[in-house]
């Protein structure tokens, strides 16, 4: 009995001691960065956060993809069990959570840190802003419009590495003859919808993409230009018919090993190439805007901070927000993840050839908003449902798919 | 031991006569007070929740509930959505097959086990064991078994049958049957055990009588034993149907609704639109349709079952 009491006393004393340095808090951060490159990048945030402050980073990685993770995050926030900080994509995914007052207003921290001046392009901060108040920290810039090509696959097939989408399509028979998959594509809906939007942005003039996704113009969506995109999507479906992997990084791995010719995937794929020790321009090649057009969208990730009652936690949130946007964390994170930093004023000497291409396009101002900044989750889910069906069913005619797509766009908010 | 007298009597006890009318409100007051929390829970949580959901299915709520009524718009959109229609078809196929096969296989296994065989308890344990696994584990296990590169197909091909093809999960036309196999594997054991208990409850005298009359065993089963096991069948039926309607995790673990939308089910539609699509109104409309489907099945049955008894 005495024994137990002594142990109890000792533990409670320990507990009291641990609680004494009042400001230290365990901050749970949820995100869906689970592939090799992503995990390495987020570990940089955790490292710098713990070095710079006395708080502890509690990693709340949710495996799957954003489509799996977001419902979990949202139900925790709306269900009264908020985490310390959470990832969302820039744009409309957390729109209603902000409107409902569940997210912390970061305007004071943003003004103190002069975010307005350092964040480039400024549209990233606009996506975090509602009624003049800032509710999220931009973490990185991601653009979808990249075609990743395997040097080895094309060398094996005996054809030169393509430099445009048209050449990529033309080289497909040679790859197939060499027993390779021309286009690697994971069987998840978001990858298909990303490919679709990328085709539209890269192969058509900007105003078509904006007309469809921003202005929700049903006529443009049903028009002849977009019909061409559905035809290209039909081609892509045939080229990817033998690609049965699920996750995007498995598809990227097909390109790394030379099993597949190429993959259309955002710049986060670069982290996987880097993890595999491949060199840009030698082992793999990248074509921004699919090689057809120097264009990128500036979507990406942002951290939101749910409102918490605990003051210590709130302090930790503010510290984390400052750390995330600090030049040091931005550089460390971007190099590991292959994304571009949100600050225009950091020095990326270590950037490789592909990242430099991306930075040059951003610097020239050729940037469009990402789909997530333009359409809401409801519309996104409907488009994904359509495309996942289109890719699984080879008899689904492009014309029928376009008709349904136009209907979805017509009903979108 | 089919002639165990204790079990045999259970089915036949009549309820005590309720001749004296109790003074309703005051009788057993403590018990009634004790029941209040349960009654409140049932009213507020179950009934209240249902009414709330149905009400908000007529609104255009997005991520958070919002009382802006839009009439039947959510339902119109729901029934114009291909994925929802495919979900309903899948549920119908899965439901019908699962109902028939669970009952048939469960009963046959139970009848086989009931033949006074040796090591009966070992067999019973083996057959019931899958029920101890969650649907997620079941789904993952069967995803591997049915995977053409690692599972059944590759094993049989390695044995020399090169042309053998068995990959239900990768063929959109039959993928739902791949789910069905896993569902049956998981659930039939429980039905079997229920049936076995029912069979043990049948008086041994009946068997003796039918043997004296020279009735073949299969006829005795179908025309005498099965009708006598009606309560067991009804219990099994309720368990199986509730399992059908809530089918979700098995699909998520096994196929994620794919290939394409070939194995989508209503519960997954509800979840995906409520949380993934951030469209509560659409999710509520879909779940209301699920409730309606259950009601259409359950209400006539309940009226037959309980209404009939009171009259008789």
Image (tube, rainbow, N blue to C red):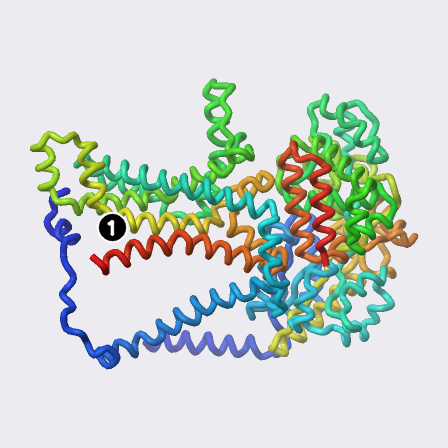
Residue drawn at the location 41% of the way across and 76% of the way down = A8
| A176, above or below B133, in the image | above
Q: Nearer the viewer, residue A268 or A402?
A: A402
Residue A62, visible in the rendered structure:
no
How far across and how far down the image is residue B154, in percent?
50, 27
How many callouts does the rendering have?
1
Relative side of B306 to A289, left or right: left
The answer to which of A167 and A87 lies nearer the viewer is A167
- Residue furthest to the right in view is A364
Residue A400, percent from left and from top? 70, 39
Q: Measuring from the top left, give residue A399's x and y in whole percent.
A: 73, 37
Image quadrant containing the C terminus of chain A: bottom right
For residue A304, what is the image quadrant?
A: bottom right
The residue that appears at 42% across and 53% down in the rendered structure is: B296
The residue to which callout 1 is attached is B231
For disc 1, the chain is B
- Of A170 and A159, nearer the camera is A170
């Amino acid at each position: 009995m005495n024994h137990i009491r002594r142990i109890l006393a000792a533990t409670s004393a320990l507990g009291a001691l641990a609680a004494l340095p009042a400001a230290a808090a365990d901050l749970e951060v949820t995100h869906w960065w689970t592939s090799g490159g992503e995990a390495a990048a987020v570990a940089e945030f955790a490292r710098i956060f713990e070095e710079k402050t006395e708080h502890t980073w509690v990693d709340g990685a949710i495996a799957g993809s954003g489509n799996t993770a977001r419902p979990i995050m949202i139900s925790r926030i709306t269900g009264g069990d908020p985490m310390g900080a959470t990832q969302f994509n820039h744009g409309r995914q957390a729109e209603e959570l902000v409107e409902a007052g569940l997210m912390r207003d970061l305007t004071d921290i943003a003004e103190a840190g002069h975010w307005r001046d350092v964040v480039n392009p400024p549209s990233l901060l606009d996506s975090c802003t509602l009624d003049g108040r800032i509710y999220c920290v931009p973490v990185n810039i991601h653009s979808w419009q990249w075609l990743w090509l395997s040097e080895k696959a094309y060398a094996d097939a005996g054809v030169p590495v393509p430099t445009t989408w048209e050449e990529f399509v033309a080289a497909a028979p040679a790859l197939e003859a060499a027993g390779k998959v021309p286009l690697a594509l994971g069987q998840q809906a978001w990858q298909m919808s990303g490919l679709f939007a990328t085709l539209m942005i890269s192969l058509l003039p900007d105003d078509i993409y904006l007309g469809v996704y921003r202005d929700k113009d049903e006529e443009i969506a049903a028009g002849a230009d977009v019909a061409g995109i559905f035809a290209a999507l039909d081609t892509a479906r045939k080229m990817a018919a033998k690609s049965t992997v699920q996750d995007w990084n498995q598809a990227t791995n097909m390109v790394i090993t030379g099993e597949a010719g190429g993959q259309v995937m955002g710049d986060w794929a670069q982290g996987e190439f880097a993890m595999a020790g491949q060199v840009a321009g030698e082992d793999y090649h990248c074509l921004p805007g699919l090689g057809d057009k120097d264009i990128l969208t500036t979507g990406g990730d942002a951290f939101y901070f749910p409102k918490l009652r605990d003051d210590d936690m709130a302090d930790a949130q503010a510290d984390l927000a400052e750390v995330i946007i600090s030049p040091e964390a931005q550089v460390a994170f971007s190099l590991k993840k292959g994304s571009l930093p949100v600050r225009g004023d950091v020095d990326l000497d270590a950037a490789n050839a592909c990242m430099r291409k991306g930075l040059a396009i951003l610097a020239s101002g050729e940037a469009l908003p990402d789909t997530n900044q333009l359409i809401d989750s409801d519309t996104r889910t409907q488009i994904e449902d359509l495309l996942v069906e289109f890719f699984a069913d080879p008899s689904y005619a492009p014309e029928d798919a376009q008709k349904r797509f136009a209907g979805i766009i017509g009903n979108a908010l | 031991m089919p002639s165990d007298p204790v079990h045999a009597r259970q089915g036949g006890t009549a309820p005590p006569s309720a001749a004296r009318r109790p003074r309703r409100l005051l009788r057993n007051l403590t018990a009634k007070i004790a029941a209040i929390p349960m009654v409140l829970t049932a009213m507020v949580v179950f009934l209240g929740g249902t009414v709330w959901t149905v009400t908000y299915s007529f609104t255009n709520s997005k991520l958070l509930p919002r009382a802006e009524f839009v009439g039947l718009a959510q339902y119109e959109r729901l029934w114009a959505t291909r994925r929802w229609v495919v979900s309903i078809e899948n549920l119908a196929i899965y439901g019908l097959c699962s109902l028939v096969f669970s009952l048939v296989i469960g009963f046959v296994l139970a009848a086989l086990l009931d033949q006074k065989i040796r090591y009966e308890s070992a067999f019973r344990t083996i057959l019931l064991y899958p029920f101890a696994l969650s649907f997620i584990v079941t789904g993952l296990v069967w995803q591997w078994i049915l995977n053409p590169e690692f599972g059944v197909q590759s094993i049989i091909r390695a044995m020399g049958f090169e042309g053998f093809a068995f990959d239900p999960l990768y063929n959109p036309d039959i993928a739902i049957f791949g789910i069905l196999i896993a569902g049956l594997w998981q659930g039939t054991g429980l039905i079997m055990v229920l049936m076995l208990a029912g069979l043990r409850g049948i008086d041994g005298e009946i068997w003796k009588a039918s043997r004296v009359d020279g009735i073949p065993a299969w006829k005795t089963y179908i025309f005498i034993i099965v009708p006598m096991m009606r309560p067991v069948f009804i219990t099994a039926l309720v368990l199986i149907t509730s399992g059908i309607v809530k089918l979700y995790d098995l699909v998520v673990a096994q196929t994620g609704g794919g290939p394409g939308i070939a194995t989508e089910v209503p519960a997954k539609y509800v979840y995906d639109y409520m949380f993934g699509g951030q469209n509560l109104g659409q999710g509520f409309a879909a779940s209301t349709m699920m409730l309606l489907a259950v009601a259409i099945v359950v209400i006539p049955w309940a009226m037959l079952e309980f209404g009939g008894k009171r009259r008789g």
